Amino acid sequence: MAELARYQRSEAAQAVPTSKEAANNLFSLAERLRAFSNREHDRLDQQAQIEGKQAGLDAASGVKGGIDLSDNSTIYSRAFNQGAQLAHAAAIKIDINENIERLKLENQYNLEAFQEKAAGYKKGLLAEVDPVMRAMAEADIDASISGGTISIGREIHKRDQEEHLGDITKGSELLLRNIENFSRDGQLEEAQANLDQLEKLLTEGVEAGIVTPASMETELAKAYELSDAQILFGGLKRILEEEGLDAAEKAVEEFAKAKLAEDDISATSRDNIVTKMETLLTRERGDISRENAIVNAQSATETKVIKELAKDATYALQHNQIPEGINELIQRATDNGDTIVAKDLAEELVITQKIINKKIKVGGSELDVSFIHQTTKIMEAVIGDMEKKENLSGPQAKLLERYRTVLTETQAGIKKDILSLAVEQGRITELDGINYAEPETIAKRMDQLRLVRTLYGTTEGSPLTDVESNNLIQTLNDEETTVMEKAQLLQTLVEGFGDDAQGIMKQMFDKDAPEYVLVGELLIEGHAGLPADILEGMDLIEKGLVNIPSGLDKEIRIVLGDAAQENPPYAQMVIEAARALYVRKNKGLSESTVDSVDPDQIESILNQITGGVLEINGVKIIAPKRGINEDMFEDRLEDLRPNDLNAMGGVWGEDAQNAVEDVQDATFISIGKGIYHVVLSDPGDPKVYLLNKQGEKFVFKYDAKAGLPSTWAEGITKDDIIDYPKIEREAEAKVEAEEKAADAAEQQEFEEEQSKYRKDQVLTYDDGRVYKGAVQMINGEPHDAAGRKLIVSSTLPGERSE
């Protein structure tokens, strides 16, 4: 450190005479200079000491081995050494604490191992530390090892005490269980022996310092209380077991009321005994009750089994199947006393036998076929005859309900899958398989379909089963099926099944696969290229091989209008086909021209697909068939006759004669090919539909005419076609007869009125003139034919007559 230069007297200075006061002033200045110099020296010394110590701390921080010390020649060096030694000592201390603590954790219950490893650590550490710090390090590590030894010893002692206490606790629990059991069973010597062992065990705990004398006294008191209570409980229990329920109830009652002495058990123990005895008494009462009711219980169990079997049997019977062993089950229910179950089963069996076996009568004539094998029309007639009867018995009412169920299920099955229904109901024994590549299998299937339709009396039903229809749709949707294969498959269906392919199309439409329905319908109509073009367009769209104008669908909807609004799937079918055909015709469009949509081309495409969009009474509809224009549709409405409406299904609540004009003025909504709903309300108003006889929306069938039975709606027969001229003739004849009857009654009334007057009386006017013409009664008084009032008078000589 640089020493501050002290003041030196200048040799050039010359002594001059000074006064005393001046001398004092000079002395004072020298002292102040000296004091300033000393203060500056002290400040610099302190700064050197701080900096040196900090430097020493930094240099030796974290160092356990030897450290490089400076000489002690300056304040800075001495401070540096001091800081280095402090940091070195701290590092040693931290290392000792960390390692001794680690050894303690690793050898928590092994004192010998701890001491051995600690000694090894000590040896290594002392060899590493700076000699100057060795004594201090040794003292620190010895202190840490000593503390660790004490801590481990304490843990070992604590563990041993806990283990000892655990042994005592387990032993006490076992002895207490023995005391409880022996005391309850009346084995008093064994109970006392276990009490003595418990006392000995607790004494060992006291001597070991892990059980307090007070705890021992408390535990022994509890054990003796337990023993006494169990002795009393065991005695009462043996009364129950040996003397029975009544004796035990009396003993428990007396015990509960007895007064307790000081050396007796506690009131709590007595209450516990009474509670446990009440539980045993209740259980005994239950056992006795169960023993008395064992026969009923067995019967109830049998009833449960019978009811489960009856449930399954009833289900089978209600589905027109007679399960095996039904008669035995009815007898089993009867023998077990389940008469209601037996009765219900017997009734269901009779009903089922009537449905599937018994011949039925229609109109008084017995038919040689059971109900379930009749046509739906005959089923309806049988049900109608039964519904006309009053006061049906319970079995007859059930039979009627079953008839209705069979009819409903049959009608639904015809629409969904007529062939599978026929097999299920036993109309045919089995269904021949079908292979579209083998025409003979298609011919056989058509023979079976015609047979089944005849049996059901219907023209509905698809030649494919529900499963076959699903497989067909799956094949058509398969990406591996080419456009040509799809077209060929649909063509095969149309050629093989002819007009009945329409049933397949309806199945596919109902299964949300309308895109192929329109193609199939075009094939049925005899088109070849157009269906293939639609299929190709669909394939191009699906594979992303064409550019689709962004406004194409919107333009198609604009041209289509609301012609198919009531049938969204049909509308979507038309839109998809139109889109496919449009992109097929314009597949060469580039991306720059693809958004250009040609409305005229769209209108032409829709005409090709649907046969045209017509506007009838201000509302757009799909043309019923290709070639029908608006004038032709309006002519059809103009020529509409009441029986045409009857051929379509009839109308609700009024005669078809009155509905013709309503239909002619109505608007129509396309719901399928050539069929429409009829809207009676004005466009824009809430829709009011014409309803059929069943109260459902009337379906206007464009080609249905009364004189062409082949065009009639499903289920319509000649009985539904009304002879309106005959009705008019009968009505006219009735009016004529009523008029003649009225005239005769009037004449009779006149004659009766005339007979009221005696021959000596005459009718005169108020001027005396006699009246002999026709008389009419007005308000009970006679009047002439002109309505003038007459007077009843006696015959007078010289009378004047008119």
Image (spheres, rainbow, N blue to C red):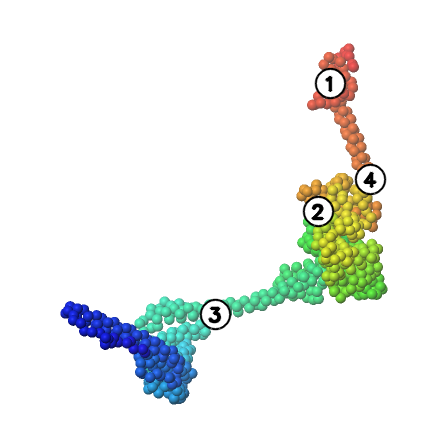
Mark found first going from the N terminus, 2 or 1: 2
* Residue type, numbered disc 1: Arg
First in sequence, mark 1 or 3: give its number. 3
Rendering coords of residue 766 (x, y %): 72, 14
Residue occupying image coordinates x 65% and y 62% = 311
Task: Indicate the quadrant where residue 569 lies.
Answer: bottom right
- Residue 302 lies, with reference to residue 175, above or below; the image says above
Q: CA distance from mark 2 to mark 1?
A: 58 Å
Disc 1, disc 4: CB below 8 Å? no
Left or right relative to 704: residue 177? left
Horizontal side of 275 relative to 430 (left or right) equals left
Answer above or below: position of 82 versus 673.
Answer: below
State the residue position of label 1: 788
Q: Quadrant of the C terminus?
A: top right
Distance between mark 4 and mark 2 Cα atoms: 27 Å
Q: Which residue is mark 4?
A: 726
Residue position marked by numbered label 2 in the rendering: 695
